[in-house]
Amino acid sequence: MMEWHILRFSELDTYTLYALLQLRVDVFVVEQNCPYPELDEKDLHPETRHILLKKADKILGYSRILPPGVSFKDAPGVGRVCVAQTARRLGLGELLVAKAIATAKEGWPGKDVHISAQCYLQRFYESMGFVAASEPYLEDDIPHLKMILTVNSI
């Protein structure tokens, strides 16, 4: 049975922290062959929410919600959205983003939700209600695009 966990940094036990960081490194550094500083101060912010989809002790999906002012000036941001390679093609990405949106809406009602999406995922995020709000730009040498989910569409 899969379970959702929404935790702040101070609520993460060491095993869970290790597992979520391992998943993020496996996806964003190893799979995408993109060496970049995966560990940033944003994880530590007391208002950051870490969203985990777990089956037993295995993390199948992860995302984090950053409070307004951390990545985006006046809006919460969704980031580090990833699904374990062994759990892909099961629709978990959609469930994960929907949970992230709901978590952002609950934490910061009335605020638009922003994301810096990899360009190849533009249609996926559009299917979740996000709209492109920038021209493509490079972030860690990968083409990205700022996208916004407006309050009206939540």
Image: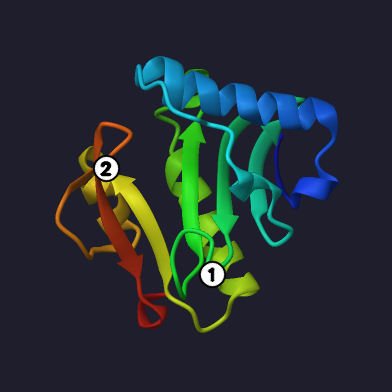
| Residue type, label 2 | Leu
**Where does residue 108 sit, x and y in percent of width and height?**
59, 75
Label 1 crowd (10 A; few <14 / some 14-19 / many >=20) = many
**Where does residue 6 sit, x and y in percent of width and height?**
71, 52
Is disc 2 placed on a helix, strand or loop? helix
Q: Is residue 17 left or right of residue 77?
A: right
Q: Out of 20 and 95, give the one closest to the viewer.
A: 20
Q: Pick the quarter of the image with the C terminus.
A: bottom left
Q: Residue at x 45, y 32 (%)?
A: 90
Count of number-bearing discs: 2
Which of discs 1 and 2 lies nearer the camera? The answer is: 1
**Residue named by callout 2:** 121
Q: Out of 50 and 41, give the one closest to the viewer.
A: 41
**Residue named by callout 1:** 68
Q: Pick the quarter of the image with the N terminus.
A: top right
In the rendered view, tell whether residue 46 sits above or below residue 4. below
Q: Out of 78 and 38, give the one closest to the viewer.
A: 38
